[in-house]
Image (cartoon, helix red, strand yellow):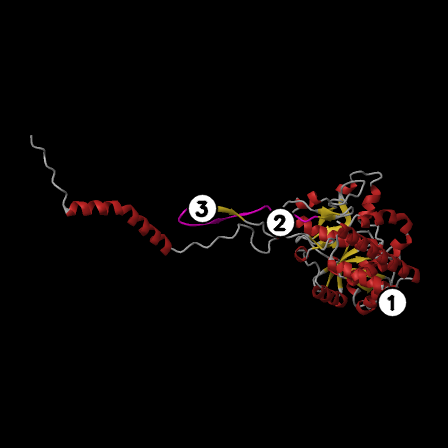
Amino acid sequence: MKRAIRAAPGPLPVLGLLLLGALPGLWTVLLRRQAAAQPVPEPRPPAGPPPGRWGSFGGGGGQKTSRALLAVPTAAAGRRERGGEGGLAATSSPPPAAASPVERGIFWSRELEERVPPGFAAEEAAAWLSAARAARVASLERGGCGRSSNRLARLSDGSRACVRYGINPEQIQGETLSYHLAGVLGMQERLPPMALALVEARGRQWEPVQEELRGSHWVEGAVVSLTRWVDNLTAVVAPAPWGAGRRLQPLSAGELSGLSPSQLVELVQWSDLILFDYLTANFDRLVSNLFSLQWDPRVMRRATSNLLRAPDGGLVFMDNEAGLVHGYRLLAMWDPYNEPLLRSLCVFRAGTARRVAELHRRRSAAAELRRRLRAREPLWPRLGFLSERQAELLQARVDFVHRHITHCRAQAAAL
């Protein structure tokens, strides 16, 4: 029986089989060359807020002294993505540096201070004071300026001013000295511009309102203050720790991390206010609220006396006539409230602390105040200046504030 003989494959089929087997390898090479020819996408930075926005820092832990908040918030760890032909590969990256509201342990950060509303700029205040001194009083109205003896004046240039007539001369003296001490401390932008005027019914400035002057019962020749009227001011309630109740509690790190940018900006201004009121022994603001706690447990949740807020969030330190002269006579009564209020504060504006340190080093608080007053208020001799004893008290209070700031710095360094 004959076997079937198979024909040997020809060269073409063999070549085809070889090419078919090589196709996967060629396809892989082509894909690699194509991928290599395409540009690799640049890595994208971590998502975050636009530069310069204070809202970039969020919650987190921190450190604190026994007297104040010294919290340094932390930022959540971010992730960044790399794009590519092979898909998304998630890789961890170090967290972006968070902006801290506190620097060097006890000072508000520069970034936070830059967000504080400017208040009454020096150039603007000087222009208003010059115009107010030259203007005539066109009308006097009751109401809107505190005591019944005060008046709201409309000046001939169209502006308005509160005219304050003191029950006794030391009130106008205290208002004036407090205003210029704020200038020595670098915080005068928080106080409305103020100038002195002499009541003269037949004088050029007051001639249009002779009838109103007769009804005011003001004494001829009395010195009054003209304070710039500011529209659209609203009441201010003390924030924690000062609005917490009967005991003054320092802010905790947890409370700080939950505060909004506007709340932090307000705290910067409160730190200046508390220091200012201690130096002047002003009892007619937050201290009077603290005093009233003995019969009104809710008083700290109500508006703070003689403190208002402008539409841009800036605080306005109003009606400072209780400062220095009158306040220094009543230290025994009000310092039990003023001193603990200062001790509840252990974070300051660096510029304010620097000026306090300079006044302490040179022992020049009264001299600097006198120099500024004489240069900027033509009628200052009508009121006089601090007595020798009052000047000593001012320097002693500056020294106390400086020691307190030094104590806060030492506490922060020990942490």
Residue 48: % across, % down? 55, 50
Q: Quadrant of the N terminus?
A: top left
How packed mark 1 is, by other alpha carbons closer than 10 Å (few <14, some 14-19, many 20 or more), is few
Nearest to viewer (mark 1 / mark 2) = 2
Q: Which residue is mark 1?
A: 381
Q: Which residue is mark 3?
A: 88
Disc 2 residue type (three-letter): Phe
Which residue type does callout 1 highlight? Pro
Q: What is the secondary structure assignment of the residue under circle 1?
A: helix
Which tag is nearer the camera, tag 2 or tag 3? 3
* Residue 408, label in figure: none
Residue occupying the far right of the picture:
389
- Above or below for 158 versus 305: below
Magenta stretch encompasses residue 326? no
Residue at mark 3 to residue at mark 1: CA–CA distance: 78 Å
Q: Amino acid at mark 3?
A: Leu
| Residue 81 is a magenta residue | yes
Residue 142 visible in this rendered orientation of the protein: no
Label located before the other in sequence (2 or 3):
2
